[in-house]
Image (cartoon, helix red, strand yellow):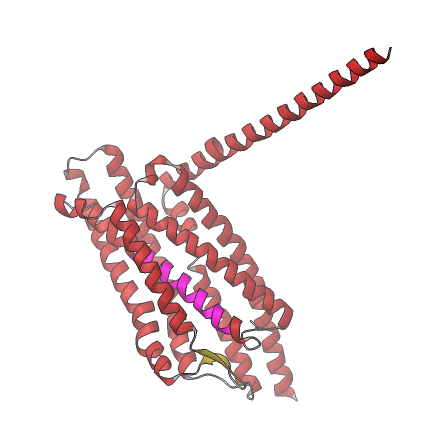
Amino acid sequence: MASSSVSDGIRKFATQYSIYTGCMIFSFGVIGNVLNLLVFTQLKLFRTNRCAFYITIESISNLIYQFLSISVTILTTIYGDDATGRSLIWCKLRYILAQICALTTLYMICFSAVDQFFSTNYRFNLRQMCTLKLGRYTSFIFICCVIIHSIVLGSSYDIQPTFGCVLSNYVWIQYSTYFFYPVLNGLLPIVIASSFSILAYHNVRHIIRRQLPIVRRKLDKQITAMVLMRVIAFVCLVLPYITYRIYAINFPISQSMPMAYAVGRLIQAIFTSISIINYVINFYIFIVFSSRFRRQVKLVLVRKCWQRWKYWCCSVNNRIESDNNIELRNSQMKSVENI
């Protein structure tokens, strides 16, 4: 009885933890990613920049992931769990969408780092190699491959009575254990992003020697610093969750063991919340470590968004006033006619 009450308490705490952290992360994530989209799409400086294009795709992917995450939080509030063990369609769909967003975000960070290495390279032919058109084609093809891969892997999830929504096929368990999580989701993006961001930072330190416009120089320095800090945060946040997922796939905990299952739920909630921060933090990293980005955010919010909003409100008020004046004149003319 005592162990049963303790396990129930742990499960309740895990549920409450998931709900509160989910709502908090969702709020910060939506605000941060929307502001990222505003800055990188509204400023002319970023419209033709390839790295800004990759960050824009990353922000869109992060937003989709945030809505998926809040859906899980709402289901946790209603049912006490993520409801993947209750519906086979939701069991598969949740992992398909999560993998699409996760892989897109991880590899857009890699693309940003690679692009900055080529953009800041002292060799002219390497700088000319990467174009915005090539970046768009590469991103489109990559996202299509990610969608196909995620549908195939996500479709192999199944509901088992004692374990819930888990990978049921031995081949896919081995694939996830030895390739998907440690390599495709872990080592490969970490190595690519870390290596190229460090090389890009090395290039930027010598950028003053090259004959480049001051605006271009400042932009390269700004984006390289932003990408480097993003990569550091990405590595720190992705490693714990990857380690946990490899363990959870190979050693699922049965619901027939209440204490172990409750502790597993709590550990899952903690590692999931750490992982979700990776889809929230990009805007806040940029604004903390780049004073130029802070000025750009202020410019977009004050001079563009606020001015447009004020213009729209004024135009609506003027329209209402003109409509009221017309109605007043019509009523006066009718009263005159009646006299």
Residue sitting nearer the eye, 215 or 319? 319
State the image coordinates of residue 161 (x, y, percent, origin top left). 54, 85
Question: What span is in magenta?
Answer: 91-110
Q: Is residue 123 visible?
A: no
Q: Is residue 185 magenta?
A: no
Q: Is residue 9 visible?
A: yes
State the image coordinates of residue 123 (x, y, percent, origin top left). 12, 45
**Residue drawn where x is 51% and y is 30% of the image:** 307
Is residue 291 shown above or below 57?
Answer: above
In the displayed structure image, the side of residue 262 where residue 246 appears, left or right: left
Q: Quadrant of the N terminus?
A: bottom right
Q: Quadrant of the C terminus?
A: top right
Which quadrant of the structure image shows residue 109?
Answer: bottom left
State the image coordinates of residue 54 (x, y, percent, origin top left). 33, 50
Is residue 261 shown above or below 300?
Answer: below
* Farthest-out residue, right: 339
